[in-house]
Image: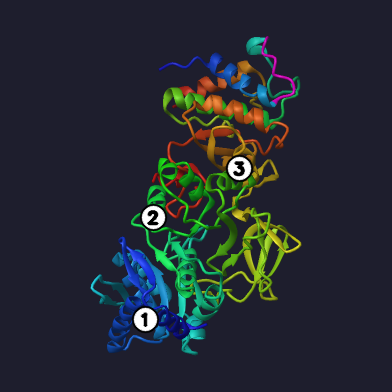
Amino acid sequence: MNIQTLIEKFVKAGNAPAIVSDDLTWSYSELVKRVNIQRNLLNKDGIENSVVLLCADYGHESLALLIALWQNNNIVALHKNKSPESLEKLAKVTGAKLALAPFSDGTHFKVECQFNQRQPEIVHSLLGKAEPGIVIFSSGTAGEPKGVLHALNPLLAKYGNTRSCGKLLAFLLFDHMGGIVTVLHALSTQGTLVLPKERTPREVCRCIERFQVETLHLSPTMLNLVVNTDSFKARDFSSLQHIDFGSEPMSQTLLTRLQKAFGSVSFCHTYGMSEFGLLMGDPDHPDQTGVKVDPEYKLRVVDGILHIQGPTLMQGYINQEAEFTNDGYLITQDTAELKDGFLKITGRRSDIINVGGKSVIPSLVEKKMLEIDNIADVSVYGETNPILGQIVAACCYLHEPEVVDEVKQRVFGCLKGHLSAEQIPRLITISDSPLVTERFKKAKSPEKIAHI
Amino acid sequence: MSVNLDVVVETAIRGQDALLAVPIDTSRGRSTPLFSEQSAMDSITLVSIIVDIESRIKGILGKDIMLADISDLPEGSQPFSTIGTLISYIETRVSQL
């Protein structure tokens, strides 16, 4: 599949609903019209076969502009931040000469970037072949974000030929891989992309009921938050059929809790990174705490770290060297277990806690702690300690208020005999806010909680 | 606000009972051995007690106190050998806040 065949699919879908934005429905015919208007404007300005910054969030106009840019074989660097400082920084990194932002009237705002004229060598691998592409800025664990360059066609081929999603709630961020996969999945299967007005558990619940959402793409942390809201109990979720989850480990305890809460909905574990897109799991597999590996991908675990190779692997980073092995595997830095083609991600290498020389994997401790009464969610992390190097710390979010001493005693009592002395959290705190970051992933320390 | 360090230390020690096969016997009061040759306490339990004490003092005084770092003490200092040496050490740290 390429961008032209995607447009042909849109035309064929006609008046079927494509996007729900601000509670208004836009059909595929209307989307095609919007794409054509944007494309005419791009052609007028000669914007083709170039690197362009697109400063936008979800919306029918953003999507029309994104698709029009791809039709003109541009590499689109996505970013939500429109500040001049941010634009200057991203233009320098990507070599973009233009930044665009959509207007609600179907036109767009254009800024000429004068910051530099030199494009990174890697973008020519696509521009030289007049192939559209996308740059996603990945949250690096340290330092500057990494610009991840993908060719569009492999992503379209992969996510455009997957199962139909029906009405899909777009919750994952637009300028991240999860958001792009959500868009490609919904629009290339003639589904409906439902855009929430805000990213809150309450709005998720409202949209599911109001727009009869059939598929959700959410993180385990966000799903846990949703089922703990009053809105969840009050709303009708009977339209919901599939929940695809990923971006962080899922414990059996949490999965069981979610399966009980959502009833007959099918759950499917996915595994994704900006660097290779999303490995879609098998919803029929009995164990959804891991991913049944797609045979198109080659995976191996070396020294506990996952290596991966496959059709949607990135072209590379635009602003730094990528970590590939000599035989072309990406070194993910994710810690994983792989057995008989079944993958379980246990965390990130950088998350491993070193307690007096013994390694502790936070997700294993979190899994046990979620079995303890009144603990709705928990984030386990390493706290620096002069005697042992690090100790295990846990920040808990509770169902009902409880003093920290009582929680600590119950945690100690429940974990003794199940975890080693090094694995047991020695510092336990309680958070009043759900343990999520601004990106709706599990906050890996109290400082990273977004307080939404 | 003053801190009753005997109570704070005793509470922190009792807080470890749920994890230990044999609870720490504190019947000798301030002479009770903690992290010393006369005691079987391991380093993770010591750290657990120290972290608990740090949290409690922060809760009372509203200030961070760092007890685990003894790098600035004179050579040969053994602040964790008994309950008494630990309390003396904490008093010194609290007075420096």
| Kind of residue sitting beneath label 2 | Cys
Mark 3 residue type:
Glu
Q: Secondary structure at mark 3?
A: helix
Q: Which mark is residue A366?
A: 3
Residue A263 against residue A95 in the figure, above or below: above
> Majority secondary structure of the magenta segment?
loop
Residue at image position (67%, 39%) is A423
Extent of the magenta region: B20-27
Colour option used: rainbow
Of tags 2 and 3, the one toward the viewer is 2
Which is more toward the observer, B33 or B49?
B49
Q: Residues within 10 Å of mark 1 (few under 14, many from 20)?
A: many
Same chain, labels 2 and 3 = yes
Q: Is residue A297 above or below residue B96?
A: below
> What chain does badge 3 belong to?
A
Would you name the residue on which mark 1 appears?
Answer: A68
Q: Is the C-beta separation of discs 3 and 1 under 8 Å?
A: no
Q: Quadrant of residue B17?
A: top right
Give how far apart the Cα atoms at labels 1 and 2 are: 28 Å
Quarter of the view holding residue A11:
bottom left
> Looking at the picture, how far across and down is residue A22, in whole percent?
30, 61
Residue A413 rendering spot, x and y as whole percentages: 65, 27
Kindly identify which residue carries mark 2.
A207
